[in-house]
Amino acid sequence: MIKKFLTVLFFVLITSPVFSAGGSGGSGGSGGEDKPVSQYDIAVKMIKKAKKFEKKQKIDKAQKHYKKAIGYLIKHNKKFPADPDTLNYLGFTHRKVGDYDNAEIYYSMGLALDPKHVGINEYMGELFVVTNRLDKAKERLAVLKDCNCKEYDELRLVIEGKKESKY
């Protein structure tokens, strides 16, 4: 009888969200339910790490993180196609690894869905500066003109040559 009780108790404990792996209750968690981490969230973390490596001039490590982010973003894009934010980051990461052709494709796909997307317009403008197409960069800047956002100023400074593209 005690053996049966202990078996049931053990089963309850290991299947309870409080004690099972990944549960948040009682283990110093936030007290709420842990929400699943998406491929997109993982990619964003990778991109943030890559940017930190760039600031420290650790370019090889940054490139590895950008390439990993691309993999996660592609997986996310397959599950959730037509998301301008995902396409923005796909363009961004491809640009950061020097794949300008694919960067432009992803940015263009994102703009087809959301022509006023602030991030895509800024980053695509920066791509155009890097690829010596200032006229096209200025077109992206014109789209951002009335956004009252930092992205307008960032792109303007890059176009004017007063600032390197920070991303």
Image (cartoon, grey):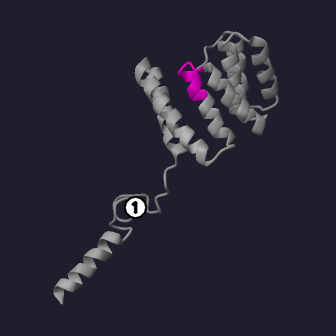
Q: Residue at x 21, y 85 (%)?
A: 4
* Amino acid type at image mark 1: Ser
Q: Nearer the viewer, residue 86 or 99?
A: 99
The residue sitting at 43% across, 62% down in the picture is 31
Q: Quadrant of residue 27?
A: bottom left
Magenta segment includes 6: no
**Position of 77 compared to 51: left or right?**
right
Q: Residue at x 23, y 79 (%)?
A: 7
Residue reaching furthest to the bottom: 1
Q: Which residue is mark 1?
A: 24
Magenta residue span: 92-99
Position of residue 8 relative to residue 82, above or below, is: below
Q: Is residue 40 visible?
A: yes
Residue 63 picture location, percent across and down: 46, 23
**SS class, disc 1:** loop
* Above or below: residue 86 compared with residue 153: below
Left or right: 144 as drawn, with respect to 85 = right
Q: How many marks?
A: 1
Direction from residue 136 to residue 43 in the image, left or right: left
Q: Main secondary structure of the magenta part?
A: helix
Question: Percent from the top left, x then y, of residue 156?
Answer: 73, 18
Residue under the point 60% across and 42% down? 77
In the foreground, 4 or 34: 4
